[in-house]
Amino acid sequence: MGLRWINEQDLKAIRAQADIVDIMSRYLSLSKKGKNYEALCPFHDDHDPSLSISTDKQIFKCFVCGAGGDVFGFVQKIENISFPEAVAKVAEMIGYPLAMPTSAYKSKADPNQSYYDILQAYISYMQYELKSEAGTLALDYLHRRKLNEDVLYRFEIGYAPDIQASQKYFDAKQYDAKTLKELGLIQNGHALFHDRFVIPIHDANGHPIGFTARKLTNTGDEPKYINSPQTKLYEKGHVIFNYHRAKTFAHKAHRVILVEGAMDVLAFEKADIHESIACLGTACTTEQLELIQRLRVPVTICYDGDSAGQNATYKFGKKALAQNMEIVVVQNHTNKDPDEIFDQGGKAELSAFVSRTISFIDFLFDYLLTKYNLDNYEDRKAYAQEIFEAIEKMANSFEKETYLAQLKQKTGFDFHTMVKQPVQPKRKKQRSMPIHLTQPMSGRDIAERAIVNCILLSKSACQRFRDEIGFFKDPKCQKLSLYIYDVYRTYDRLDMDQLMAQITDEEIRSFLMQIWNDPYRKTAFDQAYFNDSMKKIKLCTLQERIDAINAKIKTVADPIEKAKLSVDKQRLLHEQGRISYGNEKQNESI
């Protein structure tokens, strides 16, 4: 009856070792609240943190959309994958060696896998060449730039040898020219990358899709850097360099550092700072902005201090402002890039440099002086208006007064009267029950779910329900009960992980997690609660039969038949009274 590859012991061990806060922080920006955490819910349009994470119970719950569950349920829902895939993914995150027969679990085939394989093989070839005699100059150059073996290995940096050697490699692998051209590896009939060290570029999921390559000297007419052309895999405006590596570190550091190029990312790597990314150019596209937003952490903009870098900071900041992203700007008055700062001051200097940040509003006060002439009235008005709009959108209440005073002093314009008064926050309702835009459950449905919870906690309760009632009207309760009965045939107590390992139906597994992780459920068996729920189901069953008889009486013309139906109805009414009275007496004696 079970998914045999999910070993019960594995499931229990993974659940015990996986901290839900650590796993969820890889996807969301969490804020500590007491001993628990809260976050914006990713499963609905949330603006006021409504998702709560319990560190004791190791569950999450959104009190607006109703989403909730354990660590497996969260990963399953946010990744939109099956339960077995979620278990495997959590195991991978915590480094748990989960063994699975390949016949039991197969991921969907990627139509581009053959292309990824070619690019990965080419990466391995260039890594080999870097350590060969032909790559000596390249390796020496990288070492002079203080790139150690760890960085070279993790970023799979290699060396593309001369054109003839590269062509010999392509011929030996028997790659056809059309495929190589589609992947951007050959251009005008020969290898695009040659006599350069090469850094692979990956998509958000870690698949190799292109390359950026730098020549080893600054002499000659060739450009210093060349990148892969647009291909079926690589579209520059849709990709962020190092995104697939940095996203985990960004959640832990509660920031992502946005830099201009791949060498700037490597500079931070040399300083053991792993949350930097690059758009591989100064312009950030809408698609790249969406990827950065998906990280749900504040952005530290760390572009170069030259004119191009400052212009790029302004353009990105305006886009981020429109999307309500949280951003700060690194103060860079040096005209040096991160790599130069590391070379001169090492790890300590680069760490201090990236920590010297100002707000985007402070950045605008200085930067906009290069766009507007404050001696000109129209320019001064435009300058004031643009900064005021940023203050309105980004500044909190205690910052606004300072910024508005500064703006008045600089321009003469007083915007105090235009500031929107903060709306008095409405008192939040007690989060006693999640808000569901669904049909409310009937009394019987509530009672049946209560019984399911009771039989999860007690084998004797399970046997009594089966003997006295025997079935659930709700199909999900009925299906789940069959799995529970199956466990109790062998064991006296029910283990949650053991039960989960038995359930093959995805819907029933989700239903079980919904019941088990309900923050209001009883966690210890309560006899009186069980008796009341049993009574409710019995009374509802009798009422349904009485209603059916009443409906039939209206359609029957034969007086004898009507009399028989009336007798049956009276018997059922008597039974209703007996159950109500008898259970009331029983509850009084408990």
Image (cartoon, rainbow, N blue to C red):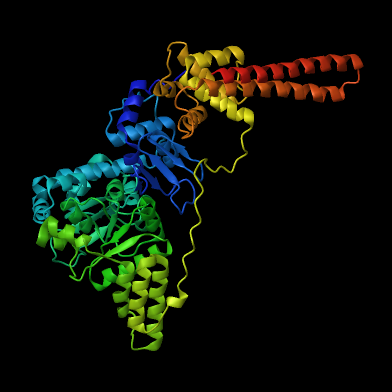
- In front here: 460 or 495? 460
Q: Residue at x 61, y 29 (%)?
A: 445
Image position, residue 184 (x, y; %): 31, 52
Image position, residue 561 (x, y; %): 87, 15
- In front here: 519 or 531? 531
Q: Count of labels shown?
A: 0
Q: Residue at x 47, y 70 (%)?
A: 420
The vertical placement of 402 against 175, above or below, is below
Q: Quadrant of residue 27?
A: top left
**Residue 70 seen anywhere in this rendered image of the structure:** yes
Image position, residue 251 (x, y; %): 31, 48
- In front here: 528 or 18? 528
**Residue 80 seen anywhere in this rendered image of the structure:** no
Image position, residue 506 (x, y; %): 49, 29
Quarter of the picture containing the C terminus is top right
Q: Residue at x 30, y 79 (%)?
A: 370
Q: Residue at x 33, y 77 (%)?
A: 406
- In front here: 268 or 108? 268
The vertical placement of 546 against 260, above or below, is above
Apparent side of residue 186 relative to residue 499 in the rendered image (left or right): left
